[in-house]
Image (tube, coloured by chain):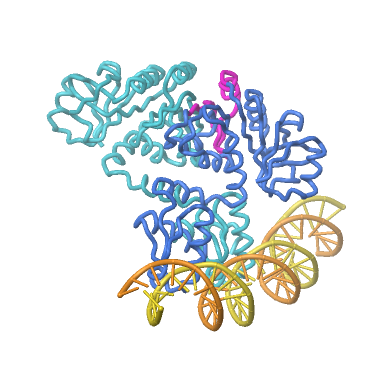
Chain colours: A blue, B cyan, C yellow, D orange
Amino acid sequence: MLAAERREHLLGLLARTGKIVAKDVAADLGISEDSVRRDLRDLAAEGLCQRVYGGALPASPAVVDYDARQAVAPDGKRKVASVAAALVQPGGSVILDGGTTALAVARALPKDLACTVITHSPTIATALTDHPLAELFLLGGRVFKHSAVTCGAAAVEAAQNISADLCLLGVTGVHPEAGLTTGDAEEAAMKRALSARAADTYILASGEKIGTASPYRVLPWEKITGLITDAEAHDTVVEQLKTLGVEVLAA
Amino acid sequence: MLAAERREHLLGLLARTGKIVAKDVAADLGISEDSVRRDLRDLAAEGLCQRVYGGALPASPAVVDYDARQAVAPDGKRKVASVAAALVQPGGSVILDGGTTALAVARALPKDLACTVITHSPTIATALTDHPLAELFLLGGRVFKHSAVTCGAAAVEAAQNISADLCLLGVTGVHPEAGLTTGDAEEAAMKRALSARAADTYILASGEKIGTASPYRVLPWEKITGLITDAEAHDTVVEQLKTLGVEVLAA
DNA sequence: AAGATACATGCAGAATCGTGCAAGAACAGG
DNA sequence: CCTGTTCTTGCACGATTCTGCATGTATCTT
């Protein structure tokens, strides 16, 4: 029994039965109560459940399965996503790029936040379908399968007809000299088109992207408003970026 | 044991059992744990699984069980879908509507069929992302959440720029007098726009839709090429439709 | 108030991880 | 056919993480 698996099990149990009794679970799974308690403590710290004497209860009946899904994103991406989601103002509009980090942002949007989300990713559109308040606009075009977003002339043209307060872009490389880069020329062009339609552009860059570069440049540093990353604030690359005048939001 | 083969094995195991324990796999395959760990690290970097202490879990449990649920599409829908998928010619183009039956069609498209699929459903676009040969075009617009498709002026306009050999439409009601109907006016308009862009239009109608009607009319009988259904060939309603000149393909 | 139960914390042993390294296989070029 | 290069694989080692137990404390029950 993997530790992570155990946590999933606990969340599942919580969602299904609405409560967890530490003693019973320990007996069922054949592990010590200490482990169960430790897990519950961790989950409670992440806001995924409410710790009570003897076990745990759902954090808030409505948000459990939403948060449970969010728990599947790697920690770094989740942190970045949660900071990014906080940039979206009530009633505001956001252009959301494709990719796993952007998907995490979509999932991190509070259920009580009324906003407009514009995206070229069918995956993100699907994920936001069950958001109660978000207005959704999908940019059509030819679907690039390897990244599951629409690109190309039609998509860029579609982007010309919209505008937004904020644009959240994913990239595959963040490098002081190379700038913001990605692995496909079409995608890079699409990202530029999206960025151009928003007042502010922030880059979503989980730690592993920092200091790396890919073949195609998306944007130079001057064109973006800031960078959201979970990399150490004193990482050498991050320091370099700051001296370039890039606003770095730590996740 | 080839490296690629090993990776396949890991993914298969993950899909079947829902988890991977590095130690066990290493023992089973007679290779070092290091190799397994390396593979898992790579797979995780590609987003194909989630690395956890001791092994790995599916990338997104939520997606997995979503797919599992979809896989168990009711028998009727699957039959209808398979007949519909057979109408798509190699090298041809098809406009695919949204809805669960259309999704089943997408899944039923042979992996070795090269064709162009045009859709206004992000769900279907996502489902076809892993189809090796299908060219995919997504019609953008405002996303109607309750049915997860794009509708409205922008979507209709986007539809004007495409055309196809075949259009496969889902509806909620198939009635001899009321015609083909659905529950939303915007959706009905969108379906009309799609149908107008294809040489032939077939209706996907699993048995339970036959003989029922919804508020908004999509198309009159004259405008469609045929109806695909799993209802009994001698069903009274089906007989009536035939006398109206509707071509009925039995699934 | 007293006993029982659950809890947090510290600790030690065990399991797992990442990294560097070297041996071997696969491969390209001469 | 030989040689240098690259890639893969398994091993060693230090670092990290996990787990169960012991201990003292907090909370519940009667």
Q: Look at 50% across and 57% down and name the residue there.
A: A44
Figure quadrant of the C terminus of chain B? top left
Q: In the image shown, does B213 or B138 lie closer to the viewer? A: B213
Q: Estimate the x, y position of residue A179 in percent, counting from the top left.
A: 76, 36
Q: Residue furthest left?
A: B236
> Residue A66 in the image: x percent, y percent?
45, 46
- Give the total of numbered labels: 0
Task: Say whether residue A242 is magenta.
Answer: no
Q: Residue at x 36, y 47 (%)?
A: B69
Q: Which residue shows up at 53% across the image and 42% down it?
A: A108
- Res C19 quadrant in image: bottom right
Q: In this picture, is A161 found above or below B53?
A: above
Q: Is residue D11 left or right of residue B82?
A: right
Using the image as rendered, state which of residue B105 and residue A234 is in the foreground: A234
Image coordinates of residue A64 in percent, x first then y, are: 43, 50
Visible residue check, residue B26: yes
Read off the magenta span: A136-162
Query: Is residue A153 in the magenta section?
Result: yes
For residue A144, above or below residue A59: above
User: Residue A238 vs residue A40: left or right?
Assistant: right
- Give the x, y percent position of residue B202: 32, 26
Query: Is residue A1 something one can see in this rendering?
Result: no
